[in-house]
Image (spheres, coloured by chain):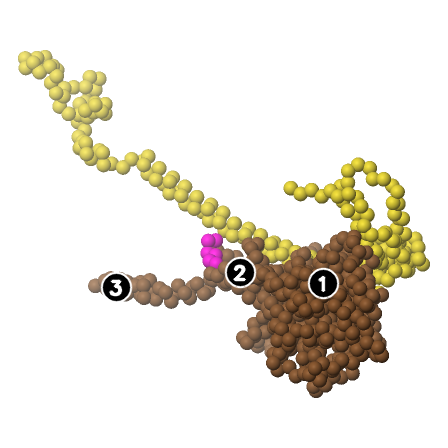
Amino acid sequence: MSNPAGAYMARPRPNLMSGGSAAPKLPAPAFPGHDLPIAPRIEIVPTRSQKRARPKIAYAAVVVTGVLAIVVTQLMLSIGLSDGAYEISSLQQTQKELDRSNQVLSEQFDKLSSPQNLAASAESLGMVANSAPVYLRLSDGAVLGSPVAASASAPTLTGGQTLIPNSLLVAPSVTAATGTPAAAGTGTGTGAATGTGTGTATATGTAAAGATPDAASAPPAAQPQADVPWQGALPSPTTR
Amino acid sequence: MAVVAVVAVFVVRLVTIQIVQADTLNAASFDKLSASTSIYGLRGDIVDADGTVLATTVLRYGVTASPKSVTDFTRTAADGTTSTVTPTQAAAEIAAITGQTADQVYGTLTADPTSNFAYVVKDIDVDAFRAIRDLGIPWLYYESNPVRTYPNGAVAGSVVGFMGEDGEGKPTGSAGVEQIDNQCLVGTDGLETYERGADGVAIPGSTVTTTQAVDGGTAVLTLDSDLQWFSQQALVDRIKETGAAWGTVVVQEVKTGKLLAVADYPSVDPNNIDGTPSTDRGSIAFQAPFEPGSTFKALTAASVLDAGLANVGTQVEAPYIYTDPNGASTRDSEFHVDPLRLTFAGVMQESSNTGTAMLGELLTPEQRYNYMQAFHIGSSSEVGFPGESGGILSPWDQWDDQTNLTTTFGQGVATTAVQMASVYQALGNGGVRLPVQLVEGCRQPDGTMTQVPDATGTQVVSPSAATDTINMLETVVTGGYAKADLQIPGYRVAAKTGTAQMSDGNGAYGSSYVTSLAGLAPAEDPQYVVSVTIAKPVTIESALAAAPVFQKIMSQVLKEKRVLPSTEPGPDLPTTY
């Protein structure tokens, strides 16, 4: 028995010097310093296998910690997942709202870019159609056709009549917007402005109308000067 | 003993719940937990060749209420103060947004206090929906549903068509391209099922998409919406000016057969179908055949030239009244004592009926009939427009003597405006007639193009016959009676006038006319056909009613398509001798 505890275990001390003849030399078992002899304590010594089968506290600790860790992890995971669910839900809500905004804006865009609206707007700005188109051929710089500036009294595209109905257009926005400032002579567009494009267009219209109130609004086109030589290479479209 | 009995009871119950009733109970719990949302497979857009949206689908919102639970509710303002809102106040707030009266809304809410459902308002737009939602009324519910909108209104309205309902009350295309391409456009709704908690949030991991929603494809048209608008505007303007009854404009690309504009008057704004009488909602250009009159002479001329029976210089003495060997007779529109000494080109320029009849009858009726068929007269175009007419052409062996004669100059035979444009397309394209195209195809969400129509052409007349015909038609613009209204500075134009008598509907000719103009430019290498038809003009009863529209639209086409001005003078064929 290597266990030093064994030292306290009372048991007949084996005769280490079993020489037979030496026995009588030994004193009777007695504890020096003690007057009274102590009764020997007796205990059952577990067998080797019994000792092995006994659970150890370290193991228990590991298991308990493990279980706790798993529980906590799972809890965190659940919290994370449901957090995610709420986040998804709120993002989906945001997406829905953005989709709606997108729809509103594209509807408005399509409506405003309809030819009826564009033509009415162009006319309200005093734009006229030039019936003499002229082409510049990029390959050799040739001017094809004879350039003639349109006069302010040239007929407009629609003659001011919207003959092609579009029930989505309640009122052509630019027309509505220009009316006020042109009459009042102020520089701010305060009509039924419905977008950036409208705002810009309004400002232009006002300026034109303010400058030449009677000669309508076509700004005099620059007279073409045929005798100005072209310097350098002509711009030419490139493709890759 | 008692313990065993209790355990047995429990076991039996356990088995019943876990095994016997498992499916039923599961299903019941799933019903409680699960929610399913239908995901809309949106109907596809209809766009023009540039991608301008002509028809699209947007979501509109319906507001419903549960009258049972309509009560006062407490509203917390942004600054934290609370106020009580009565149903009357709520009704007034809703009405201010929807444009109804407060009484109307309140009436809806209280009509049947035991009901759990009532429509407050249907089909409101996003802004109104958001405004109502922000009122925070607890007993209101919202639903969305897709509706069709046409941002350009009546621009190409008669061609784009509109929606109606099928036999089961589901929306389906019921006119125009909406109908032709319904298969392409229609989307398939999906269904998404998931389990949700008490607050309506999906339980993680439970989303099961049962059916995937499939958006519809995009129908891509060959039309050019700007040109379309311009054509409609010019047409309507002229119709109002001349007091005409109806009219059409067809613009076609010569080298491809694609229609760039199909204008009709009267026409429909698909956003507001009820604003147009039901008889005026179709496309006249596709659906209404009429006797074309003199514009048809180009077909006769090309046939005679192709058969080699005459050439551009063939000389004809065209009398005022001509009676053919069968006894049928016709006269020129203008009285003249002496016969006109005209070349074939001169016959075209003068639009002489007698001269055309004499030259046309060089061909047998059967030959002329075959040429007409080759030009697709009598059979509808490849577009397959709903209710499209193929014109009226009776078989040659059923022609009476008069019909035999008049079919040379476009009476006794009826065509649609699209068919006439197609005839000129073939002449401009070296005698090769291309299938008429309105739809380029169906663009799938993944970008591939399906249902692309066949574009194989057929040689109808020889290239030289076609070119000669164009050259003869050029004399109409350089010297015909409508020349002042037809010429376009810088360009060579070939065109033919037409002033056809209209049938009175009882087998005789009435007193009204269909005036028309069909032509090509530039004449040396035709790129575009413009065909204008104006019926029953009051102030001008000749092709002069249609000519300015032709000139205006052709100028716009040439400008918009950047066609370079002609550089060489025309052949200037002799017209008299």
* Sequence-first tag of 2 and 3: 3
Q: Chain of mark 1?
A: B
Secondary structure type for disc 3: helix
Residues indicated by labels 3 and 1 sit on the same polypeptide chain: yes
Q: CA distance from mark 1 to mark 2?
A: 53 Å
Q: What shade does chain B have? A: brown
Identity of the residue furthest to the bottom in this view: B506
Q: Quadrant of the N terminus of chain B?
A: bottom left
Q: Look at label 3 and name its amino acid.
A: Ala
Disc number for residue B214: 2
Region rendered in magenta = B204-209
* Sequence-first tag of 1 and 2: 2
Q: Chain of mark 2?
A: B
Instruction: Examine the image and state in which quarter residue A170 appears.
Output: bottom right
Local crowd size for mark 3, using a 10 Å CA cut-off: few (<14), some (14–19), many (≥20): few
Asked whether residue A85 is in view, the answer is yes
Disc 3: which residue? B8
Q: Look at label 2 and name its amino acid.
A: Val
Q: Nearer the viewer, residue A162 or A47?
A: A162
Residues indicated by labels 2 and 3 sit on the same polypeptide chain: yes
Query: In this rendering, which labeled residue sits more in front, label 2 or label 3?
Result: 2
Point 81% across, 68% down: residue: B576
**Residue B213 position within the rendered picture, expressed as x and y whole percent measured from the top left:** 52, 60
Left or right of A180 on screen, residue B274 = left
